[in-house]
Amino acid sequence: MKTSLLRFFLLIAAFSIAASATLAVPAPSGAKLTFRRVFKGSSPEFIEITVREDSDTAAYEIRQLDEDAGSLPFQVSAAWRTKMFDLAAQLKHFQGQDLDVHRKIANLGEKTFRWESGPEVHEAKFNYTLNSPASQLLQIFEGLARQQEHVDLISRRMKYDRLGINDALLQFESDLNRSGSCPCSTRSPAIRASWTSPANALVPSPSASATRVREHCITPIGRANAASKSKSGTGLSVLK
């Protein structure tokens, strides 16, 4: 009898410990979407951007391969994240997806899309793709990378060459004209500060081109699904 009771209490204790351990396991966080491009001999050679489904805070790393690794935070609005994760869903979160065109074309750098959600991880690598959702997603990621390159340039000019800030804004404008799009994140403090900081009083007032950059790229995004309405299915419209 005593042996039976002892076994009974031991079973209850074991069950309680197991239940406590199960409850202690944290729930998996929101899904994470990562883009990486490695292109040796280009500038930059390495680009990696990670966006989380449940957070405005994203991370980017843009550098040459021989430079020290290290990512920096930046902001991506909920509207753009929704668009990006919708495109990833159209691609079945890259599970079993062959995105490469498989033709003899120039090396454009190895590109990787990666999806992570708890223990679930899928990725697809390609050099060049004709897949429409993949092309749209690539455009958004590359646009975010260009934006951060411009922001970094403007930040450096603010610190070391304030008279060159307007030229940096013009470079941003030139890129905007070439691409016809600006998949920017939320308001960029570095760009706004380039003409609002008292420390930059000697900097010429923003040109019309720089003002256009402000209007299209620093104000909050209003039409996140503009890209999906493009007739071509792959281009991105300027968001206002």
Image (cartoon, rainbow, N blue to C red):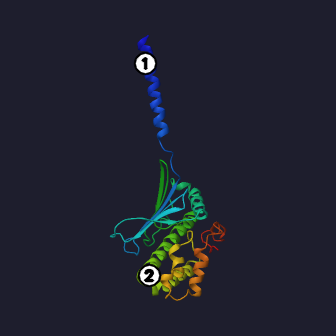
Residue 133 visible here: yes
For residue 236, side relative to residue 148 (left or right): right
Q: Compare marks 2 and 1 and give the one earlier in the sequence.
A: 1
Seen as rendered, the residue at the extreme front is: 198
Kind of residue indicated by mark 1: Arg
Q: Nearer the viewer, residue 129 or 134?
A: 134
Residue positioned 57% across, 59% down in the render:
85
Image mark for residue 175: none
Which of the 4 image quarters holds residue 80?
bottom right
Pointer 2 and pointer 1: residues touching (CB < 8 Å)?
no
Q: At 55% from the left edge and 82% from the top edge, which residue is drawn?
A: 173
- Compared with 52, 119 (above or below) is above
Q: Is residue 8 above or below residue 140?
A: above
Q: In the image, residue 27 lies at what x, y percent? A: 51, 45
Q: Quadrant of the C terminus?
A: bottom right
Indicate the position of residue 195 as horizontal and vertical percent values.
Answer: 53, 82
Label 2 is placed on what type of residue? Arg
Residue wearing tag 1: 7
Q: Which residue is mark 2?
A: 157
Mark 2 neighbour density, 10 Å: few (under 14) some (14–19) many (20 or more): some
Relative to 50, is 208 on the left or the right? Answer: right
Out of 19 and 61, give the one closest to the viewer: 19
Answer yes or no: is residue 110 visible. no
Q: Residues within 10 Å of mark 1 (few under 14, many from 20)?
A: few
